[in-house]
Image (tube, rainbow, N blue to C red):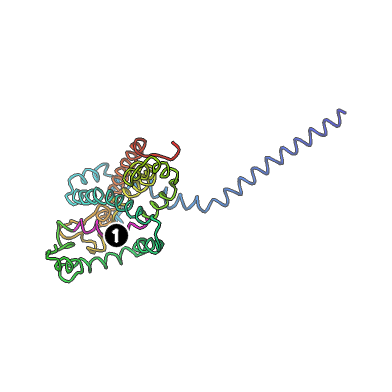
Amino acid sequence: MKALEKLNLKQQQVLIVKSKKSNINSGATGWLFASPWIIGLVLFYLLPLVVSIYYSFTSYSILRPGEFIGLQNYKELLVDPLFLKSIYNTVYFAVFYVPLSIICGVALAMMLNMKIKGMTIYRTIFFLPTLVPHVAIAVLWMWLLNPGFGLVNGFLDMIGIKGPAWLGSETWSKPSLIFMSLWGIGQSVVIYLAGLGDISSEYYEAAEVDGANWFQKTFHITLPLLTPVIFFNLVMGIIGAFQQFTLPYTLTQGQGKPANSLTFYVMYLYDNGFKYFRMGYASAMAWVLFVVIMVLTLLIFWSSKRWVHYQGK
């Protein structure tokens, strides 16, 4: 009996050792298959991130190594008039574009959610502008908003209104850009449609039994239960607005005219890094932008506890 017990004990120990080796081998195999992604993450994300922090404290340029200058880049930003102008332009765009994109997106989604014949065609039409490259959108709207022969001013002339210079006017250039950006909100409309489809019809049936009208159902059922989707689009809209680049850069050929009214933050960052070769200065600008977006995102997350409502809670 004792010999048999010893034999069983040895077999159990052998099985445990084999199991440990198998776990180690499977773990090593998993790391091996994940290694290309991990190497890419370190080389193309983490390493440039750390290096950019260091470069923001130097006078580094593509043409010369540069020297450590401490907070000089950040101090220079505070007195750079074009930097302050780019902040104003970017904040102006974000303040008007983000709320308007949410209002227009929700309104369009509610209209496209109606049960009428041919709705899929209408949904496709509103989504198509998101498939057009931003460069093509810029060229199209430059023609439409041309003060001399553009279709927009031509239509306004027909009804007795003299149209402004639009992109050639310091006053109307940013509103024109906001209008162009609103033309391509089809992607967020699709997300709102998905959110509307997730709202249970039982809520509306109960409201109808209580005699609620369309406005009451919209403001007491639809919008509160759509707030998780609005919250997501708000965060993404803020991030996208502060990183506005392609449209204004294409419209102005990178010059930000007229009178730098279309010089946005990322445009000026790009110019410093790749046109003036001031990589240290551009790195400082990038980290200022990162901090601003992070603070705004955290504020939105903090405030979401008060206005975001989830079904079943």
Q: Residue at x 39, y 44 (%)?
A: 208
**What is the three-letter code of the residue carrying label 1?**
Trp
Residue bounds of the magenta highlight: 173-187
The residue at which mark 1 appears reads as 183
The image shows residue 250, relative to residue 202, as above or below, that is: below
On the image, the x and y values in percent for residue 278 come to: 26, 54
Q: Is residue 312 left or right of residue 65?
A: right
On the image, the x and y values in percent for residue 183 come to: 29, 60
Residue 299 sits in quarter: top left
The image shows residue 288, relative to residue 140, as above or below, that is: above
On the image, the x and y values in percent for residue 105 come to: 32, 53
Specify the quadrant that holds the N terminus.
top right
Choose between 63 and 184: the one closer to the eye.
184
Choose between 208 and 228: the one closer to the eye.
208
The image shows residue 138, relative to residue 82, as above or below, that is: below
Describe the element under mark 1 as helix, strand or loop.
Answer: loop
Specify the quadrant that holds the C terminus.
top left
Q: Residue at x 65, y 46 (%)?
A: 25
Residue 216 located within the stretch drawn in magenta: no
Choose between 41 and 259: the one closer to the eye.
259
Main SS of the magenta segment? helix
Choose between 130 and 200: the one closer to the eye.
200
Q: Residue at x 15, y 68 (%)?
A: 158
Q: Is residue 44 left or right of residue 167?
A: right
On the image, the x and y values in percent for residue 116 come to: 39, 59
